[in-house]
Image (cartoon, rainbow, N blue to C red):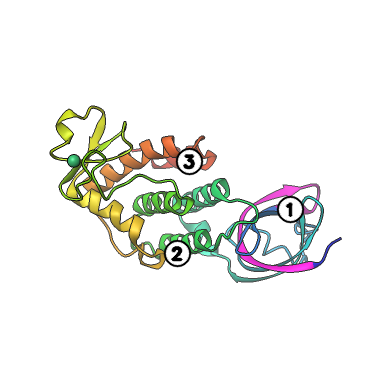
Amino acid sequence: MGEAIQVTGMVLSAMPIGEFDRRLVLLTRERGKITAFARGARRLNSPLMAASNAFAFGTFTVYEGRNSFSLQQASIREYFTGLAALQPGVYYAFYFMELADYYGREESDETQMLNLLYVSLKALLKERIPPRLIRRIFELKAMVLNGEYPDMFACAVCGKTEHLKVFSWRRDGMVCADCAAGEKGGQELSETAVYTCRYIIASPIEKLYTFTVTEEVLKELEHLMNVLSGRYMDRKMKSLQILEMLTED
Ligand SMILES: [Zn+2]
């Protein structure tokens, strides 16, 4: 067994393994996404029990093995236990975990994604902003952190930055009112929707959840993000199936 190291991060998922263990996927500042086994975590008096659950955020002491880590102890700062009572809020939280898992890499600095997860779960708990909007803000910002996202700031044809009107599927970016005439296949966006996307892309993570939008603008965002998710991600997240079943009108 290797040396003990301390990592700061969050449990993205916690699968039961064998009779008493759990297999954790942790997103960490220091080592990126890692797999850690919490042995005996499902025994009633295990000190690892509470830490071996999705959403647990804090510092984890792990031993590095050849292919995985082994959890030794944890000091949890935030359990986000209130999420379990939120319906369908908790399913949004599971979806955020799955998306962070999808984007997470070994040995990469995940500080920004951890911050995004933290403020997004807090926003779900506060219930001041509708979870449908929190989801779209999370999706777009996660794309931005991953470095692959559409240009919402300049016309993809002429480069102009004002009067952007249509999101062109072909050009994967905005097209202005003058250039839009020749464009086929796209979504017309209101000025507010364009501004909202720009705000999400450019604003610091801690300022993300400071606004709401009208139902009309939210619908625009939902349509746009559904198409973009299909383009920028090579599979649909499993947790979305449950979420969509629960939130369908
Ligand atoms: Zn143009």
Where residue 244 appears, as percent x and y from the top left, is 43, 39
The image's mark for residue 241 is none
Q: CA distance from mark 3 to mark 1?
A: 24 Å
Tag in front: 2 or 1: 2
Q: Which callout, 3 or 1, points at the residue further toward the start of the chain?
A: 1
Instruction: Decide if ligand 1 comes within 8 Å of the CB at mark 3.
Output: no
Mark nearer the N terminus (3 vs 2): 2
Disc 3 residue crowd, few under 14, some 14–19, many 20+, Cα 10 Å: some
x and y, in percent, of residue 103 in the image: 54, 48
Q: Are marks 3 and 2 in contact (CB under 8 Å)?
A: no
Query: Closest to the observer: 2 or 12?
Result: 2
The residue type indicated by label 1 comes to Arg
Q: Amino acid at mark 2?
A: Val
Q: Quadrant of residue 37?
A: bottom right
The residue to which callout 3 is attached is 240
Q: CA distance from mark 2 to mark 1?
A: 26 Å
Which stretch did the figure color magenta?
Answer: 4-23
Badge 1 density bin: few <14, some 14–19, many ≥20, Cα 10 Å: many
Residue 172: image location, x then y, percent: 33, 37
Seen from the viewer's position, the closer of residues 183 and 111 is 183
Q: Which of the two residues, 154 or 61, is positioned nearer the viewer here?
A: 154
Q: Which mark is residue 119?
A: 2
Q: Residues within 10 Å of mark 2 (few under 14, many from 20)?
A: some
Furthest-right residue in this view:
1
The residue pinned by badge 1 equals 22
